[in-house]
Image (spheres, helix red, strand yellow):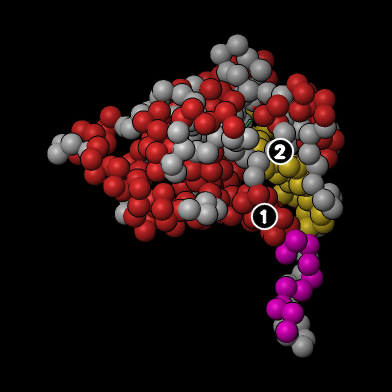
């Protein structure tokens, strides 16, 4: 962790144990963040081994460049999305001709969560932004102010599995009608305040603020999760990333995925399960005609989660889940 970037890497020991970095091997860190996983990989793959690291948050890029400066001849940091993994690697193929392992650590960093101006936390006064990449156009505020009621319902159901999505979306559309001035563009540019949005959610859900302490988790948690996934296309990105990662790994290379909630984990689990099967025909097919052959071996049958000591030291790690496969 560096002084200007607050994030404690999660499940680092387990990632290293499974990726087994050795001198001269090359790795991809698909979500560099504060550089914790990259740093450990760089310790183990010297001399000669390289790390290609991707990140879309410029603040994280600068902090990691500083943290990893002493390894700058062995790390290539690219400010681009892991959605373009294959294309990015093809540009650096001469430097990293074989990829021995890939790690992707999903979700957001503590640094992003704790900076009020990023708008990820419902307990802050910042703008309702939620972009990992501040250069992207779509913000959470724009979604809340401009998407139709049915688009909001679908978004809350798909990304938050929110049971009262219809009631909430109707309430938000009514609320924003009173809020938006005639100069709507100006309103959009300013971005809604996170606190105003949270108050609206509570009012629509008939929850007086004074009753908040009796909730185990804040009633806006799933709403914020849904918005963040929608703003950053996180589930769609993950779906695009997994096959590319498997493709560019060398045979015997390993892929480690850390996810933080069930929607992500389901995508990872299903991709790994299908990839490990020799046949993916529907069960009602009397004979196999899919010609599918297993491409990977699942190395962790269930999931690995942080132990009590890690959770005590870093409570935010508690929902992390690690899955690892090896390419056949
Ligand atoms: C949990 S943090 C990673 C922490 C990192 N493993 C460490 O040890 O410090 C996730 C990071 O992924 C980045 N990110 C999110 N979507 C991305 C994408 N599509 N491409 C690249 N990075 C992304 C976020 O900006 C965030 O910094």
Q: Residues within 10 Å of mark 2 (few under 14, many from 20)?
A: many
Say which residue appears at 35% left-offset and 45% top-offset: 172
Check residue 266 in the rendering and tell me which mark sits there, or answer none. Answer: 1
Say which residue appears at 82% left-offset and 32% top-offset: 307
Q: Residues within 10 Å of mark 1 (few under 14, many from 20)?
A: few
Give the overall secondary structure of the magenta segment: loop
Question: Residue 107 in the image: x percent, y percent?
Answer: 59, 38
Per the model, the C-alpha gap separating discs 2 and 1 is 13 Å
Q: Point out the image quarter for the C terminus.
A: bottom right
Residue, disc 2: 320
Q: Earlier in the sequence, mark 2 or mark 1?
A: 1
Q: Is residue 150 left or right of residue 41?
A: left
Indicate whether residue 90 is drawn in magenta: no
Asked if labels 1 and 2 touch by Cβ distance under 8 angstroms, the answer is: no
Say which residue appears at 32% left-offset and 32% top-offset: 191
Q: Residue furthest bottom?
A: 286
Check residue 246 in the rendering and tell me which mark sits there, or answer none. Answer: none
Say which residue appears at 82% left-offset and 29% top-offset: 308
Indicate whether residue 277 is drawn in magenta: yes
In which quadrant of the rendered view does residue 100 lie? Answer: top right
Q: Which residues are magenta?
A: 273-284
Q: Looking at the image, can residue 324 be seen?
A: yes
In which quadrant of the rendered view does residue 298 lie? Answer: bottom right
Q: Looking at the image, can residue 74 be seen?
A: no
């Amino acid at each position: 962790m560096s002084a200007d970037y607050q994030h404690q890497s999660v499940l680092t020991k387990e990632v290293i144990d499974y990726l087994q970095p050795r001198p001269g091997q090359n790795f991809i860190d698909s979500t560099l963040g504060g550089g914790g996983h990259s740093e450990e990989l760089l310790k183990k793959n010297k001399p000669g081994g390289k790390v290609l690291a991707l990140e879309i948050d410029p603040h994280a890029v600068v902090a990691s460049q500083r943290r990893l400066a002493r390894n700058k001849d062995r790390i290539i940091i690219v400010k681009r999305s892991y959605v373009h993994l294959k294309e990015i690697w093809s540009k650096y193929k001469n430097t990293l001709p074989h990829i021995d392992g890939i790690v992707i650590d999903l979700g957001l960093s503590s640094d992003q969560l704790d900076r009020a101006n990023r708008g990820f936390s419902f307990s802050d006064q910042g703008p309702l932004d939620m972009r990992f990449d501040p250069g992207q156009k779509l913000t959470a505020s724009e979604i809340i102010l401009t998407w139709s009621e049915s688009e909001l319902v679908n978004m809350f159901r798909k990304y938050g599995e929110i049971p009262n999505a219809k009631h909430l979306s109707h309430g938000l559309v009514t609320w924003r009608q009173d809020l938006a001035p005639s100069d709507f563009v100006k309103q959009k540019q300013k971005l809604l305040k996170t606190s105003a949005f949270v108050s609206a959610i509570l009012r629509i859900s008939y929850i007086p603020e004074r009753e908040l302490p009796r909730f185990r988790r804040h009633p806006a948690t799933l709403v914020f999760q849904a918005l963040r996934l929608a703003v950053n296309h996180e589930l769609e990105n993950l779906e695009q990333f997994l096959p590319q990662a498997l493709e560019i790994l060398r045979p015997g290379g390993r892929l480690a995925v850390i996810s933080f909630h069930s929607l992500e984990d389901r995508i990872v689990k299903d991709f790994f399960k299908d990839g490990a099967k020799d046949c993916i025909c529907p069960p009602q097919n009397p004979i196999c005609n899919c010609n599918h052959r297993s491409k990977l071996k699942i190395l962790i049958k269930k999931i690995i989660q942080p132990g009590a000591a890690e959770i005590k030291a870093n409570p935010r790690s508690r929902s992390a889940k690690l899955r690892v496969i090896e390419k056949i």
